[in-house]
Image (cartoon, helix red, strand yellow):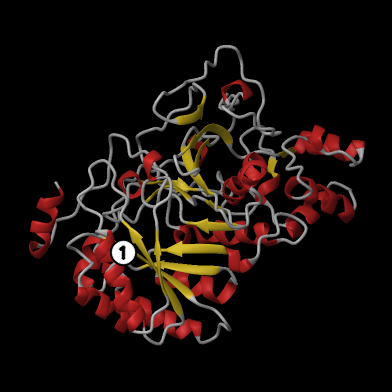
Amino acid sequence: MGRTWMRRILLRQNSLPLLKPPMACLLTPATLQKPISSPFLKPSPPTLAPLASSHRRSLSTATACSLPDPLVSLDGISSYFGGDDGVGTSNKGLKVLLKGMTYDELEKWVQSHGYRPGQALMLWKRLYGNGIWAHHSDQLEGLNKDFKKMLSENAEFKALSLKQVITAADGTRKILFTLEDGLVIETVVIPSDSSRNTVCVSSQVGCAMNCQFCYTGRMGLRRHLTAAEIVEQAVFARCLLTNEVGDITNVVFMGMGEPLQNIDNVLKATDIMLHDQGLHFSPRKITVSTSGLVPQLRRFLKTSNCALAVSLNATTDEVRNWIMPINRKYNIGLLLQTLREELRFKNNYKVLFEYVMLAGVNDSIEDARRLADLVRGIPCKINLLSFNPHGGSQFRPTSDEKMIEFRNLLAEAGCVVFLRSSRGDDQMAACGQLGNPGAIQAPLLRVPEQFKMAMEVSV
């Protein structure tokens, strides 16, 4: 049984600071190439000089926030991050994070302070709907004055601070956020010529899965994101970019992290995103991806109507054990059998299989035939993805010609299959390119003997 790599440093719950000075990590309008009208952007102090780069279009500010090297265990600190009671709190005077509450929780909280349920609905609409996206009690027009005062004293509106926005050549935006503890996450907005615009959200800082082709996996796991930190990525995306790219219609949990390892906060975040008086995403337009954590996958399919994507990427346990170590615990057979069992109870539901094509590793004609056999009988679609290179990468992308051949073989076998082009890869915004591993990185695993030649060609 293999183990997923993670360096752990145990912290006692009471060793964490309760109060920190606010971080100056906001973007100044002066740094924008195009003015962005947003209530999230406040003028920064004069000491924050904008950083410009000639080789990319970017939005940035100098900031004292840095990514610490130690990897933090979640043992004993879930209550600090709001993981025990389900309602996140902020370090700023231990105020309640509004975006960490579902609508039912918000309504009960508002009533506990002596106000009517109707006030909770009005607040909810100003947080998530009507194009307001309020981040401060002063922006709550139409609400009772005493109610706004109570909110300013007891609630925190923001879980994230905007650090930088980078625009790739194809229009993809990578957004960097600083968290309250100084860690940094990345979110990607993928515009489309059609009416489909997608925000790709992160669910963890780093990732413990150590998939060998993924840059985020080099980081190891720093911590889970709270529901508020997940939800606010979608709020920021709509607030910052709706005027430029159109309405953000889709959410994919394919950013940093393994979503189902943080399933409680992910399910809560999707619940908030689905509410028809708020962000109001369709359940079929929210896709949660997983590397294959079988118990959590079962729970997700039983409790959520959102779409599921399974990152498969291999047709044999030998290859998947190497490129995706989670397979040593939940192998291909168990994973696919679980899907067959659970999908029997879902109507008009198809799972999406993601298959990153690695030259000389998983892209042979035999792989295509095995893949068609493996998914037979499972209601599904298959996305074939080109590998996106990154620093220290062992792999090469499969050629376009070979990807087309692979697709055609699957289609001839009766599979619904799509070729997906990379988006934002010139700015490290594409699939598998997010994050900043730093000096301490997860280990590269031993290359199986039969693939060493393919790896040597890629160096």
- Of 380 and 256, nearer the camera is 380
Q: Which residue is mark 1?
A: 326
**Which residue: 62% across, 67% down?**
283
Rendered location of residue 40, percent (x, y): 67, 33
- Of 421 and 198, nearer the camera is 421
Task: Say whether residue 368 is left or right of residue 85.
Answer: left
**Which residue: 79% across, 46% down?**
126
| Residue 31 versus residue 241 in the image, above or below | above
Q: Is residue 323 visible?
A: yes
**Which residue: 69% across, 43% down?**
96
Q: Amino acid at mark 1?
A: Ile
| Residue 170 versus residue 349 in the image, above or below | above
Q: Secondary structure at mark 1?
A: helix
Rendered location of residue 367, percent (x, y): 23, 74
Task: Say whether residue 317 is left or right of residue 222.
Answer: left
Q: Is residue 1 visible?
A: no
- Of 93 and 286, nearer the camera is 286
| Residue 209 versus residue 334 in the image, above or below | above
- For the N terminus, which image quadrant? bottom left
